[in-house]
């Protein structure tokens, strides 16, 4: 039976092969790709980071990739630097997902987001991805009550405190993306149906949230150009 996965990283293995980390419905697995660096084998472009494949595995302890088909290939977006950068950041986030999770849901969500990159605003896809994936890390923002006084009359989003604030507790004069973050976090719909906004400004808020709450150093500075 074929399984499907998103290639997260590859490392050299012996002379002509690679070890590939691939994210699947079962979580992250390591597989050997024998002859992956031999161009005659045709594996080279298929096993690039960010590609999505369906494949068969051998029964070895460290399984080898056997037959495979390409579902998504980054060559479609390679010329678009912003899309490649957004994809790189998404893969870094997926790479660190804790083993104890519902990987089937996360896999299907991640795949949908990667496939959306081609035909949608890069920063919109990245924003929705980064907000929704928070639940997989157990760092969900509190978007229902004021994070200082528990008032239900929430008004703004505070990335440092990690959620909503009421008007009394907030220094911000405007709503600062609270409603958009709520929509992106809770709603389930097609990318085009989510409200648009100034995504560069929104991503600054999201990056700040990650800086204060994300449990791993995913080197957001590398991706800061996206928000400039
Ligand atoms: Zn308050």
Image (tube, rainbow, N blue to C red):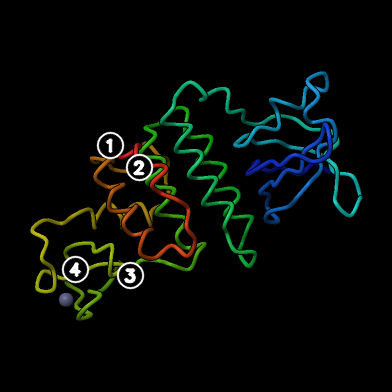
Q: For residue 10, which quarter of the picture?
A: top right
Q: How far across and how far down the image is residue 171, in percent? A: 10, 66
Which secondary structure lies at badge 1? loop
**For the residues marked 4 and 3, what is the alpha-carbon distance in whole angstroms?**
11 Å
Q: Which residue is mark 1?
A: 228
Q: Position of residue 63 (x, y in %)?
A: 85, 48
Q: Is mark 4 within 8 Å of ligand 1?
A: yes
Q: Which dot marks residue 224?
A: 2
Marks 1 and 4 sit apart, C-alpha to C-alpha, by 29 Å
Disc 4 designates what residue?
154
Asked if the residue at tag 2 contacts the one at tag 1, i.e. Cβ–Cβ closer than 8 Å, the answer is yes
Q: Nearer the viewer, mark 3 or mark 2?
A: 2
In depth, the one of 205 and 119 nearer the eye is 205
Separation (CA) of disc 3 from disc 1: 28 Å
Neighbor class of circle 4 (other Cα within 10 Å; few <14, some 14-19, many 20+) is many
Residue marked by disc 3: 142
Question: Which quarter holds ligand 1?
Answer: bottom left
Label 2: which secondary element: helix
> Is 45 on the left-hand or right-hand side of 171?
right
């Amino acid at each position: 039976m074929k399984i499907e996965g998103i290639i997260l990283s590859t490392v050299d293995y012996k002379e002509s092969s690679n070890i590939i980390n691939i994210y699947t419905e079962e979580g992250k697995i390591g597989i050997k790709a024998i002859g992956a660096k031999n161009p005659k084998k045709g594996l080279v472009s298929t096993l690039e980071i960010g590609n999505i494949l369906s494949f068969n595995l051998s029964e070895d302890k460290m399984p080898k990739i056997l037959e495979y088909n390409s579902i998504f290939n980054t060559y479609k977006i390679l010329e678009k630097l912003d899309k490649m950068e957004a994809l790189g950041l998404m893969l870094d986030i997926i790479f660190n997902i804790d083993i104890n999770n519902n990987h089937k849901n996360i896999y299907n969500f991640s795949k949908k987001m990667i496939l959306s990159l081609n035909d949608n605003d890069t920063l919109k896809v990245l924003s929705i991805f980064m907000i929704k994936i928070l639940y997989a890390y157990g760092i969900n923002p509190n978007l229902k009550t004021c994070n200082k006084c528990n008032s239900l009359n929430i008004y703004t989003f505070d990335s440092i405190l990690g959620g909503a604030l009421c008007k009394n507790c907030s220094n911000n004069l405007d709503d600062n993306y609270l409603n958009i973050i709520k929509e992106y976090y809770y709603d389930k719909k097609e990318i085009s149906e989510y409200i648009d906004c100034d995504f560069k400004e929104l991503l600054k808020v999201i990056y700040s949230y990650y800086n204060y709450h994300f449990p791993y150093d995913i080197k957001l500075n590398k991706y800061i150009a996206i928000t400039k």
